[in-house]
Amino acid sequence: MNPIMLRELSIRNFAIIDDLSISFEKDLTVLTGETGAGKSIIINAVNLILGSRASPELIRSSKEAAELEALFEVLPESPAASAAQAQGFDVSEGLLVRRIIQRNGRHKIYVNGRLSTVQMLSTINEHLASISGQHAHQGLLKPEQHLLVLDQFGGLIELRSRVSESYQQMLPLIKEWNALKREQTEQTEHRELLEFQCREIQQAKIAPNEDKELEQERQRLRHAERLYETVGRCIDRLYGADGAVVEHVTEISKELQGLSSVDSSLSPLAEKVQEASFQLEDVANDLRGYLHQVVFDSDRLEVVEQRLDLLHRLERKYGGSLESVLARAGEAEEELKRISSLPEQITEVQEKLDQLYEKLCKLCRELSKKRKKAAQRFSGKVEHELSSLGMSGTRFEVRFRPSPVDESADTHLLLDNNGIEATGIDRVDFLIAPNVGEDLRPLAQIASGGELSRIILALKAILATTESVETVIFDEVDAGIGGEVAEVVGRKLQSLARFHQVICITHLPQIARFGKHHFKIAKGVYKGRTRTGITLLDDKARVKELARMLGGVKITKKTLDHAREMIAGRDPCNDSGPGGSGSVKRGGSKAQNFVPRSGQSS
């Protein structure tokens, strides 16, 4: 079973197509029809499904929007499934891509019913299908893909992965090594700063809450005279002078005590007054003690002022409080310990880097050597394939060039003056000269759609068993060929269909006869409007279609016989009958839901 298969294609209000639905099967499917019947429109529709740019001009006249929909069957292990799952899509029941093109330019894209962007669509769909034709955006033509193609052909993917793994392991180590080296270069000045900070804070010998205690002492020293005089007066008023507060309170207590014989309820109050007199005596004694502690010492005040200045300066430098000053001292000590261990850290990382670099260089040289050997075989095989496809004399070359060197690149990413990348030290370009006497040119510069399609066919045939298997659509593969070459192309397509789902639009019966499934595209007029329809052909209808392709408008018995012979003589290795397998019953052409649902005939 192919990992990827286009199952359904639905087109509505697109160009001259009103409403069309096509079901596809595996193996080789051919689409035929008169020139201008709408085959290219179907290719354009698939291109849009794959992410090409949409234009309101493609909408059927008198309609406000066109709608394109494709259902792909995707196996979980395929690259397309991985790409879709990375975007958050569940592909267990397939991948449904829907595009709505509107005249107001507000186009919409849905993947499995969820609104998506062109970028998301392109990321997924580059693994789903490829279209080979004159204007196709084909992955095999991209220079950045050529190295992967060569590695697939040479069976070097496992070695390439080992190179990539070693390369990816080196990147964080290089980053760490560079950071450590920068830190080591800067550490002299930084270390001096840290040592100064530690020394400055340690020499201050700060005690917790020292600043608050010193602030209180400074206030006492600054106001010692006022404190002494005022407290002294308070002591006299309480206890020492004539008529002191304590004397009056004591007399009040005695008088109340004397009245308690008259009214016993006054006794508790008298006791409270007496207790108050005792407390006032205690206060007076405490104030006398405080008075002895009041110091008149200008020298001590200067010492306190200087100490507070030092503490406030440290607070301003290191966070605004003594706690933050002490915390900074701890941080600086830890940082000094780490800086002191830098040489050992650098040596450790350097040893790991050297080991990995040696391994990576060995793998890169091995991969490059094997690539060059594979390139010779690959070039010969491509030329042989193209010769069999009617392009004899074509020269094909794999040209190697070194990976570019970034001036800022680390020395661990350089080998023999080449840059090292995740893919190794090589970059390659596929060059081709389709005609004798022409210079070799990049593959993407091939102008002829027929040549381009055959080149893609040759490359696909070579890579069929090694690359990821997607749906391959060939347009113009028969341009400029005929006879025996067309026969070879048809057989090549049939062989390729063993590994890919292949859909081919062709004008040649020599190619069409190899299809396991055959659709005819035709246009007609319905209620005054041109519409395109498509029909899955059974055996009888298929003979007529091949006869039309052989003999034109007038179909004779001779051309019918020739058509029957062509179908009967087809290589049956990938077939279950002349008309192919599927759900369509034999005995006449049957359109069912394959024709426009509005009911027009094709």
Image (spheres, rainbow, N blue to C red):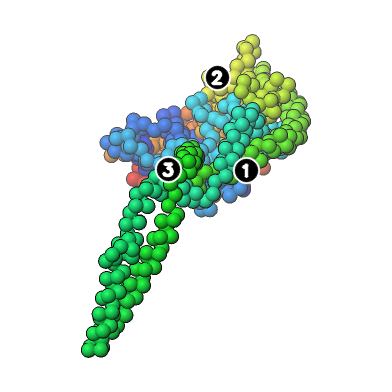
Q: Which mark is residue 445?
A: 2
Judging depth in this view, the residue of 275 and 236 nearest the camera is: 236
Q: CA distance from mark 3 to mark 2?
A: 33 Å
Quarter assignment of residue 171: top right
Give the residue drawn at x 75%, y 32%.
354
Q: Disc 3 or 1, which lies upstream in sequence? A: 3
Q: Nearer the viewer, residue 311 or 400?
A: 311
Q: Label 1: how many residues lie within 10 Å, few (<14), some (14-19) or many (20+)?
A: few
Query: Residue pushed farthest front?
Result: 242
Q: Amino acid at mark 2?
A: Gln
> Which mark sits nearer the N-terminus, 3 or 2?
3
Characterize the local packing of mark 2: few (<14), some (14-19) or many (20 or more) Cα atoms within 10 angstroms. few
**Image coordinates for residue 73, horizontal then vertical, percent:** 53, 48
Residue drawn where x is 42% and y is 39% of the image:
117
The secondary element bearing badge 2 is classed as: helix
Residue drawn at (32%, 34%) of the image:
105
Question: In the image, which is nearer the foreground, mark 3 or mark 1?
Answer: 1
Residue 95 position, x and y percent, is 49, 47
Q: Amino acid at mark 1?
A: Glu
Where does residue 208 sit, x and y in percent of width and height? 52, 51
Judging by the rendered image, the residue that carries numbered circle 1 is: 334
User: Which image quadrant is residue 196 in?
Assistant: top right
Find residue 332 and report its horizontal and vertical position in percent.
59, 40
- Above or below, 173 against 71 in this view is above
Query: Does the image show residue 216?
Result: no
Residue shown at the point (52%, 43%) measured from the top left: 325
Tell me the SS state at disc 3. Answer: strand
Tag shown at residue 116: 3
Give the spatial CA distance, label 1 vs label 2.
Answer: 63 Å
